[in-house]
Structures are given as C-alpha cells and as structure tokens.
Image (cartoon, helix red, strand yellow):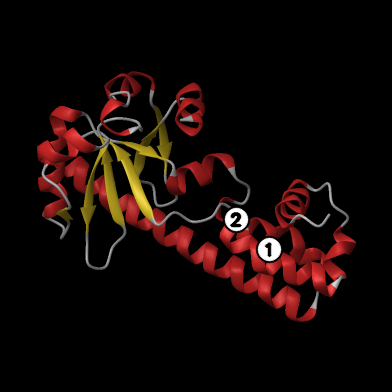
Amino acid sequence: MNDPIDLLVRLVSGTADPALLHVPATWETVRAHAPSSGVNPMIAFKAREHVSGAARAWCDRVLMRCWSKHTRNLQDLSRTIAALEAAKIASISLKGPLLAQRCYQPPFVRKPAQDLDLAVMSADLPRAQSALEAIGYRPQLSIAEAKARTHHLEMYHDTLPRVELHFRLSHGAIGIPVEEFFERALPWTLPDGTKALVLAPSDLLLHLAL
C-alpha cells in the first residue's frame, strides 16, 4: 500500500485495516495527502474512533472547521435564495451544501464548497444579477460576455462566498441550458426553513457525471 491515493481510498471505503493508522509513517502520509485529495473531512471522520492523542486532536480540528464552514454555507445559501425569491426568481441549488445534505452522512464530511452554484433561467439572469447586486455582489463579466464564454455568471462579494448563476448546467458555451431541469426539480427545506429546489435524482447523476 505504497500509493498514498490507494491508501486514502481504502480508508474512506472501509477496506483498509484501521490499525494502519497507528503506524507513524502511515499517519503522516494520510495527513500529508488527504487535504490535496479533497477527502480531509472523510478521513478525519473515519479515523477519529481509531486514533488518540495528537491524531484525534487533528481529526477534531478538521471536523470542526468543516462543520463550521458547512453551516456558514447553508446560511449563505439561504440568504442568496431569499434575495432571488424576493425578486420572484426561481433557482435550483447545484452541488455545494445541499449536495452534501442529500448525499453525505454527516453532511459536513463532504469537502465544504468555496462558492455557491445556483441554476437560473436565462431570461431571469438580468433580474438575478440585479437582486444580488442589491446585497453587495458584483459580476465578473457582463451577461453577454458570460454567455459567449462560459456556462455561468460569476458574482463576487467582499465578504460572502462567490455565487455562480448557471444558465447552462456545465461545459461552457456548449452546455445544456438549465430550463428543462426546472420541470423536474424537487423541493428541499434547508435547516433554517428556507425552501429550495434541487435537481431530480437522474439529473443530479447527469450533473455529477458531467
């Protein structure tokens, strides 16, 4: 098990002997490679019950940071959805904290997102941009430039996470327009009671594959 990635995969999947974590060289390999591989919180969650002392303290720090970031992401998502709803704009939450809520247990073991991805119908983009500008966001590109170059309009804020307003699901200017996904979107309630839409299961699989 000399390959660090193989080791991490086996630990996350539960196919590696947890006793390996007591080998100092193995533990240092885990600590060195888990962050860059995006599995830091999953490794910390899996390892915590099998280690003690400094190793358990490391696990606790990782999990606390991820829990805190995930909680803030949910709050930021609620704020963003509320701003769009106030302008009567429907949106679908893509990836990020709601993907974690749907697919991970506990949710914060998914590496916390650094931005928020929301699908918005192309016709609603100008009003969506205005709604986010009203709470302090600013666009990186004009809508015309974004549509010509990419699949989303990026909105930036000085203190809040970047918001990506997807008018195509992915793959830049050749991606699938998001309109059809609204027909199949499902309701989801955030922990604070905010109502959101998420992709239907088959559409979620398509999005993750893309």
Q: Residue at x 40, y 52 (%)?
A: 192
Q: Does residue 64 sit above or below 97 in this rendering?
A: below
* Picture residue at 34% right of the left edge, 51% below the top: 77
The C terminus is located in which quarter?
Answer: top left
Identify the residue at horizontal 45%, vertical 50% (top origin).
191
Taking the image as drawn, is residue 45 in sight?
yes
Name which of mark 2 and mark 1 comes first in the sequence. Answer: 2
**Where 84 falls versus 43 (above or below)?**
above
| Element at label 2 | helix
The residue furthest bottom is 54
Q: Amino acid at mark 1?
A: Ala
Disc 1 element: helix
Q: Which residue is mark 1?
A: 44
The circle on residue 37 is: 2
Q: Nearer the viewer, residue 171 or 176?
A: 171
Q: Look at the image and tell me whether residue 51 can be seen.
A: no
Q: Residues within 10 Å of mark 1 (few under 14, many from 20)?
A: many
Q: Gap in Å between the C-alphas at discs 2 and 1?
A: 13 Å
